[in-house]
Amino acid sequence: MKLYISLNLLCFAGTALCAAISVREDNPVPPNFCCFHLRDVISGQNVRQNSQTGELFLNDASLPQGWYCINQNYDSKVLYDRDNNACIQTSPGNEFQCLDGTPGGDTWEVASDGQGPYLKDYGNAVFSICNVNGRQQVFGPSPPGGLSCQMTILRVQDRAGQCK
């Protein structure tokens, strides 16, 4: 209890320690995992996730920022959300979704270029941001027809844990 009160006083004082502590409390990092937020390179907005449906969106302040984790030392290449749901690109539709703890066949990885780390699935770094009922939803590289979409890359930011 004393530690918690002391940390709150430090946070009140506006120290950088406060930001580091709050990231850890709100965003757990399992042992041996690398965890991070995702940011759309076109809009500069962070990806947000609907915890009820597992769907990923931009432009929806009512949803929490997504927090994703991958064990880069393990061959399965499973991407998990903060609730330990495995992320997949659904079929059909190629929707980027994290809803069930059972991993799919996706091969997620964090790659890096001269501009920093980014997310890939099935060896592809391209994702689509599509207008679905007035909301900007995240899909894989081949979204369903009839949607207004823009191709993008999802940058990895605010990494924590064992990241390569």
Image (cartoon, grey):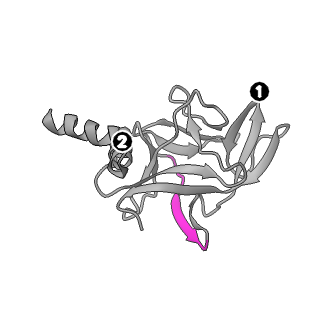
Taking the spot 61% from the left edge, 69% from the top edge, the residue there is: 115
As for residue 123 lying within the magenta part, the answer is no
Callout 1, which amino acid?
Asn
Q: Quadrant of residue 84?
A: top left
Q: Could you say where residue 34 lies in the image, as x and y percent from the top left?
A: 40, 57
Badge 2 element = helix
Counting the numbered discs, the total is 2
Left/right placement of residue 77 relative to residue 139 reads: left
Residue 4 appears anywhere in the view = yes
Going from N to C along the chain, the mark reached first, 1 or 2, is 2
Give whichever of 134, 12 is nearer the camera: 12
Q: Residues within 10 Å of mark 2 (few under 14, many from 20)?
A: few
Q: Name the residue under label 2.
A: 22
Q: Name the residue under label 1.
A: 133
Q: Where 131 falls versus 37 (above or below)?
A: above
Q: Where 73 falls versus 80 (above or below)?
A: below
Badge 1 element = loop
As for residue 106 lying within the magenta part, the answer is yes
Taking the spot 64% from the left edge, 31% from the top edge, the residue there is: 60
Taking the spot 60% from the left edge, 72% from the top edge, the residue there is: 113
Q: Give the range drawn in magenta.
A: 104-114
Q: Could you say where residue 77 lies in the image, as x and y percent from the top left?
A: 46, 58
Label 1 vs label 2, nearer the camera: 2
Taking the spot 68% from the left edge, 55% from the top edge, the residue there is: 41
What is the spatial separation of the Cα atoms under label 1 and label 2, in whole angstroms? Answer: 34 Å
Callout 2, which amino acid?
Ser
